[in-house]
Amino acid sequence: MFDYIFVIVTGGIAYHGLTFRDEEGKDDIGHLLFGAIALLYCLRILFVDIFKLI
C-alpha cells in the first residue's frame, strides 16, 4: 500500500516540477531538477517494487 501512495505522490511532484512555468513562460532549473529526481524515484518504485521487473 505504501508503494502505491509513494508512486502517486512522487508522480505528482514530478509532473508539477517538469511542467512548471513562471509568469514569463520560462522554466526554472530547480523545478526541473527536483521533477527529474522525483520521476526517477517514481519509476524505480513502480518497476522494481510494484511490477517486480528487476
Image (cartoon, rainbow, N blue to C red):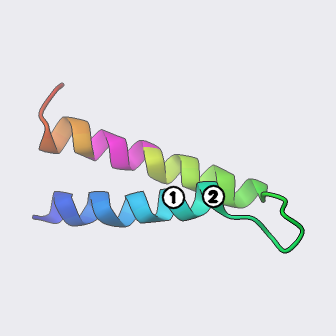
Please, what is the three-letter code of the amino acid marked with disc 1? Answer: Tyr
Could you tell me residue 45's position as x and y percent? 26, 46
Give the main secondary structure of the magenta stretch. Answer: helix
Q: Is residue 37 left or right of residue 41?
A: right
Q: In the picture, which quadrant includes the N terminus?
A: bottom left
- Residue 6 falls in which quadrant of the image? bottom left
Residue lying farthest to the right in this orientation: 24
Q: Which mark is residue 15?
A: 1
What residue is at 84 percent from the left and 59 percent from the top?
A: 26
Q: Is residue 30 above or below residue 49?
A: below
Task: Give the number of callouts.
Answer: 2
Task: Tell me whether circle 2 and circle 1 mark residues in contact (CB < 8 Å).
Answer: yes
Residue 32 x, y percent position in the rendering: 67, 52
Read off the magenta span: 40-45
Query: Judging from the image, what secondary structure is the residue with disc 2 in?
Result: helix
**Extreme residue toward the bottom, this view:** 23
- The picture quadrant where one finds residue 50 is top left
Label 1 Cα neighbours within 10 Å, binned few <14 / some 14-19 / many ≥20: some
> Is residue 21 left or right of 18 when viewed as pictured?
right
- Amino acid type for the residue under numbered disc 2: Thr
- Residue 17, quarter of the rendered image: bottom right
Q: Which residue is mark 2?
A: 19
Determine the residue positioned at 18% across, 57% down: 3
Quarter of the image with the C terminus is top left
Where in the figure is residue 8, as x and y percent of width and height? 30, 63
* Residue at 23% from the left image edge and 66% from the top image edge: 5
Q: Secondary structure at mark 1?
A: helix
